[in-house]
Image (cartoon, rainbow, N blue to C red):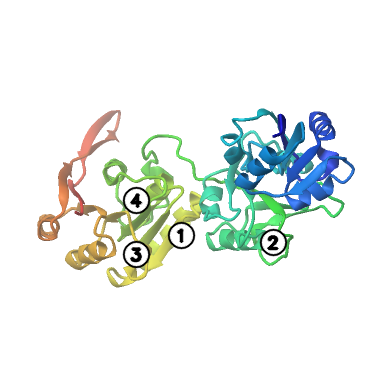
Amino acid sequence: MVGKVFVVGMGMGNPSMLTQAAQEAIAQSELIIGSQRLVDALGDYGGQKVACVATGQIVRTLHESDAHVASVVMSGDVGFYSGATALYDKLDDFDVSVIPGISSLSYLCARIKVPWQDVHVVSAHGRACDVAGSVQSHAKTFVLLGGDNTAASVCSSLVVRGLASVRVSVGENLSYDDERIVRGTAQELCGRSFASLSVMLVENDHPLRATYTGPHLTDDEFVRGKVPMTKEEVRELAICKMRISPSDTVWDIGAGTGSVSVEAARAAYAGRVFAVERNAEAIALLEENKARFHLSNLTIVEGEAPGAMAGLPVPDCVFVGGSSGRLSQIVRTVCSANPDVRLCVAAITLETLSEALACVRELSFDDVDIVQVSIAKAHAVGAYHMMQARNPVYLICAQAK
């Protein structure tokens, strides 16, 4: 059995990128274990070389060997999405030293002269990963690629998500003679071909990032026109009562100018919001406000509910700001889409309030919360200020069983 084991990070795999400590450890090793690509790269080192990557096989090889010193070489840095993590618990019988390597993250950022202390890291190497969701909520996102998740396919998903203009740097075969770093927008790179051994850094100048724990946009920040808008105080209460999580899917039915849609998209910065609206003037204002706040996760659906809701992704939360007399059909459609949905209906007439209460009662909603919001705002009258009341609004919030 081997006495001393070095777990060595080899960086991108080129021996020229080994740290001095890594070179000294490998040089004194009588046994070198790692992937075929890595052990082939260490041809100048004299130890016995065994190509394997499975944790169990590595441990068996160490137990069966007569070598005094061995190195297990890993690509990248041993603490950065590395197979070393699974190996550590299996090496209790050995004297183990760990030597870090240069990660593809630090290498690529150095090559393109971008600091990486604020980079958000995701791995799409052989795993399901919503890269677009990460990109839209972070200024810098580093992506480890692999399998079906190629640089081109990720760029295509960014374009579909409305992130065509984000800046992308793709590094392939890093540290090798055929290294190539290609930079451009997601739109420019989505049709290009890249080597499978690639990583990418995506820079987004307008990430969705909540700076407060709740909604905080004032009415004056929206493009308003003559379309009715859910006012600031009512909007804030509605967003809070919907309990929107960052990754939620939200529907805003009868979205109007989009004030609730905008706040919901900022709250669900890693999710998606669908604003359903039939009025052409409101649609135009929705588009303006979407662009004004850089909301790539807000999708505008033109049409009349409930028909326009067909085919939308399953919602976690739904706000109904306008129903055009179809509230019962809309709520039933919502419940069919997700029996566990969180619903919030805004009503300004007693008839709508009555219909909303009948709906939640008939459909056996839980946790029904009814609030009347009465707001008065000060306005100047000469040198004085008077409070001017706004129409009361009812919020009927409920959780489907």
**Between disc 4 and disc 1, whose residue precedes?**
4
**Between disc 2 and disc 1, whose residue precedes?**
2
**Between disc 1 and disc 3, whose residue precedes?**
3
Residue to which mark 4 is pinned: 260
The label on residue 189 is: 2
**Between disc 2 and disc 3, whose residue precedes?**
2
Amino acid found under the numbered disc labelled 4 = Val
Front position among marks 4 and 1: 4
**Between disc 3 and disc 4, whose residue precedes?**
4
Confirm or deny contact between disc 2 and disc 4 (CB under 8 A): no
Amino acid found under the numbered disc labelled 3 = Glu
Front position among marks 2 and 3: 2
The label on residue 287 is: 1
Q: Position of residue 247 (x, y in %)?
A: 41, 49
The alpha-carbon separation of the residues under discs 1 and 3 comes to: 11 Å
Q: Residue furthest right?
A: 44
